[in-house]
Image (cartoon, rainbow, N blue to C red):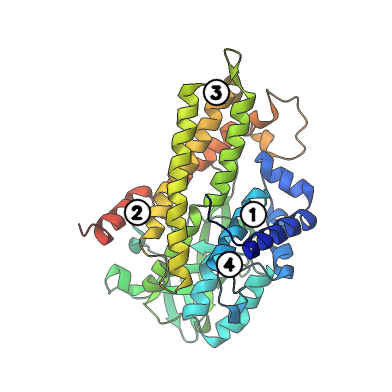
Amino acid sequence: MDLNFSKADLAFRDEVRTFLKENLPVELTEKVRRGLQLDRDDYLTLHRVLYRKGWIAPAWPVEYGGTGWSLTQRYIFNEELAYANTPRVMPFGIQMVGPVIYTFGSAEQKAKYLPRILSGEDWWCQGYSEPGAGSDLASLRTRAVRDGDTYVVNGQKTWTSFAHYADHMFCLARTNADAKPQDGISFLLIDMRQPGVEVQPIVTVDGTADVNSVFLTDVKVPTHDLVGEENKGWTYAKFLLGHERAGIAAVGRSKNALRRLKEIARSETQDTRPLIEQRFFAEKIAQVEIDLTALEYIELDVLSRESTGKGPGTGASMLKVKGTDVQQVITELVNEAVGYYAIPYVEKALVEGWNEPPIGPEYAATAAPTYHNWRKASIYGGSTEVQKNIMAKMVLGL
């Protein structure tokens, strides 16, 4: 998209591009480019590089460690991260709980947690979904019973991304069983390293185990780790989900994935002609590119709202629905372009250093696992069906 960047904006883009090229290990960006499995150190390498530069939290207020960048600069920065094939900045601290803490948290919570979120010393996970309480989150059954200066928490969270790496969890727990479902929930900050916290991996269809079940048994949470008011956690949860859903769209990364799809379509042939020149396939690429361009305009509108303090609004749901749709279509087209080379589904191919003979071209090995992994995108962060209900109510008044 041509945004008519000023000379200052172009200079900023060049600064970001040069910095990333000079400060990120080539081995790391190559793993991302190839779609290989990343580990904790890979994510933290990027986090620490950006933190040392002062660029880890562009959307935060300056007083809490933000950059003070303009909307255009934030847009350029996200584009350059994707273009450079960096890992994503883990959203749980920077994008999710951080804004909740600096908006609703106490002075003590801000002083204790925000610096460690910025530095990457603390890895956070999200304790929202439960068995039987995913899209219908308000029906959650994890209980937090107050006992003097602590809450005693019991329950189970599931689909908890990267809980096996986490130092802390931001957790929704029921503190009033007699209130309406949304009115009896509190927002707690839980130390994952204490007794009573058990993390069990869930192996997903792509062969990875990035999500987990977390069992909480008589876990003690000091009352000073209650964010905001008791029984008002649903308000903070909705605030957080707006930021999460806006980020899930990952427009810059979809643009990068689309570029790679086009490269593959130029390499693959049908009847001696590149696939990208075949009308039936070129039309599919054109359609997803049109959708992605429209999505980008929605993202810019959401960024504009956030920059004026209005929050993402219903645009977050639009981004979530269409963003995950675009992501899934691109992975489908990659599989279609790769053809029968994508049929062998070898989980080990996602692991760096796998030395067995390659099956087809380099990009074929990760095509099927990546496709399977992205099927979850239309479910997490609020399923597509739930987001459509939100838009029907908030936008159309139905």
Residue type, label 3: Glu
Give the left or right position of residue 271, taking residue 286 as reference.
Answer: right
Please give the name of the residue rendered at 57% of the width and 48% of the height, measured from the top-left corner. 253
Gap in angstroms between the C-alphas marked 3 and 2: 36 Å
Front in this rendered view, residue 133 or 338: 338
Specify whether residue 379 is in view: no
Give the left or right position of residue 311, taking residue 183 as reference.
Answer: right
Residue type, label 2: Gln
Front in this rendered view, residue 149 or 70: 70
Give the mark, 4 or 3, whose residue is nearer the N terminus. Answer: 4
Rendered location of residue 208, percent (x, y): 60, 43
* Whether residue 118 is situated above or below residue 105 in the rendered picture: above
* Whether residue 272 is situated above or below residue 199 in the rendered picture: above
Rendered location of residue 268, percent (x, y): 61, 23
Q: Circle 1 — which element?
A: helix
| Mark 3, residue position | 277
Please give the name of the residue rendered at 61% of the width and 83% of the height, measured from the top-left corner. 111
Q: Circle 4 — which element?
A: helix
Rendered location of residue 206, percent (x, y): 56, 38
Residue type, label 4: Ile
| Mark 1, residue position | 80
* Whether residue 192 is situated above or below residue 33 in the rendered picture: below
| Mark 4, residue position | 94
* Whether residue 135 is situated above or below residue 112 in the rendered picture: above
Asked if disc 4 and disc 3 are in contact, CB closer than 8 Å, the reply is: no
Q: Few, some or many C-alpha atoms within 10 Å of disc 3 (few <14, some 14-19, many ≥20)? A: some
Give the mark, 3 or 1, whose residue is nearer the N terminus. Answer: 1
Gap in angstroms between the C-alphas marked 3 and 1: 28 Å
The quarter of the picture where residue 14 lies is: bottom right
Q: Which mark is residue 387?
A: 2
Q: Which mark is residue 100?
A: none
